[in-house]
Amino acid sequence: MGANIDRSVNDGRGPPVFKISGQVHHRIGSLLPPEGSPPKFLQLYIYDTANEVSNRLKALHSDDGSASSLDPSIIQNLTAMLDQHNPFAKKFRMARDRLEQNCDDEFVIRIVDFSLETFKRDIIIQTKSGNPRHISSLHPAYMPLQYPLLFPFGERGFQVGILYSGLDDRKKGKRQTITMHEYFRYHFHYRRNQHNPFLNYGLLSSQAKIDARAAIDENRLWFILRNQSRLRVENLQGIADAIGRISLGILEAGQKPSDKADIVVRVYNMKLEEMLDDIKSGNAFGHILAGLPHAHIIFWTAEDTTNPSPSMIDKYISAEIPDPKEDPLLYALVAEHMMDGPCGKDNPKCPCMKNGKCSKGFPKSFQEETTIDENGFAIYKQPNNGRFVQKGGIRLDNRWVAPYNPYLLKKFQAHINVEWCNKGGTTRPTRSTQRRA
């Protein structure tokens, strides 16, 4: 796979991300490596197969992890599985056997596309060649060649000319074949008790989905480029009209949120919409006069906040660990979602650490009562009452609590940081920030 892969985002400070930029393309090289060079990609099936497992480990990118953490026996079993079931692996093994019989034999492997205009998209692999050859995203082998573990039987991917079912019911003159977008949208969809290579295999599935998305975008943009005279471009509202959207599936048992980022985004949006409804209806902070409903939300309450009192702030915002006996649910939610840290000397590699200090200012100082400083900013009640949360073997007390609204925290069970803001004039609005769902 050819792409500008940004590996810097995976620094251990968050869920793993597969990030690319620029054009994505698949290429295929020769059957044999240049003299003096180690084998890689399809050459691993053909050249020096007596040391195939070690060659595969050596071919790993340095950012993909240490080869010492991989079990060679698993690699051996996967290779044997592909040899038995994958048609492309079988072709490459046949080439190996032929070259072993006659090392000077010159031949090519041709992977044929039996759809329209096949001569333009057939994959031709030479014994020895210079630069790798480009593989068309319209070739049925585009995905199975790149992801043999996701498509172990060499299942055909998208190809031009796949017909809709029930063509008799379609009106004459309408398009009768599916688009690449429709093809992948169908295959991305979750179906109970069905294997799905785009959903079930963690980060590899995530990479395949991004790869497919890039192929769709490339296909659509090429269509626009080649059909400028036929398009009524004045009807396009922007790139979103040209690209469209893909619908994915749902999170399955055993998967991490990072495996299905689409679900995380959907759930976050659902919670955000409902939280906004709660705020607007007055359930959380009383009657609201106005607001700016972004992911960082700022709004003005109907209650006069020109001269806020500590009791007014305490009514909506808490920054302390609740009593686990009086409210065990709220205690558990604060422990899970609202504790910052540990950082500092107990965890110097924490993402919040900048120049040896916590960039968020934790731990705070103990505060027996809520007060308003001379600039109008609230200093929340965070008493030294002996309550703590155990996190990573470290006891965190009230100094580590991020301010929250108990009603919102209980309802949405997510990190929702609520702060009392000072506007520097006659109004002091309240701000609610939902950082993640």
Image: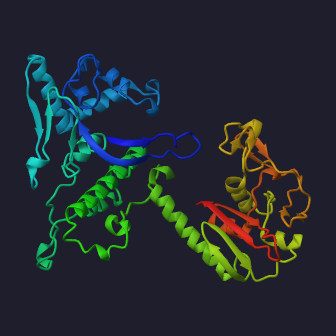
Q: Residue 30: image x %, image y %?
A: 19, 29
Residue shown at 28%/62% (left/top)? 181
229 lies above or below 401:
below
| Number of marks in the rendered image | 0
The answer to whether 283 appears left or right of 46 in the picture is: right
**Foreground residue, 222 or 105?**
222
Q: Tell me the quarter of the image containing the N terminus.
A: top left
Residue shown at 15%/75% (left/top)? 174
The answer to whether 173 appears left or right of 330 in the picture is: left
Q: Is residue 118 visible?
A: yes
267 lies above or below 10:
below
Figure quadrant of residue 411 = bottom right
**Foreground residue, 143 or 329?**
143
Q: Is residue 114 visible?
A: no
Figure quadrant of residue 353 = top right
Figure quadrant of residue 342 = top right
Residue shown at 31%/76% (left/top)? 235
Q: Residue 423: image x %, image y %?
A: 78, 70
Tell me which colouring the rendered structure shows: rainbow
Q: Tell me the quarter of the image containing the C terminus.
A: bottom right
Q: Residue 358: image x %, image y %?
A: 74, 45
267 lies above or below 204:
below
Q: Residue 314: image x %, image y %?
A: 83, 69
The answer to whether 241 appears left or right of 128 in the picture is: right
Residue shown at 55%/39% (left/top)? 11
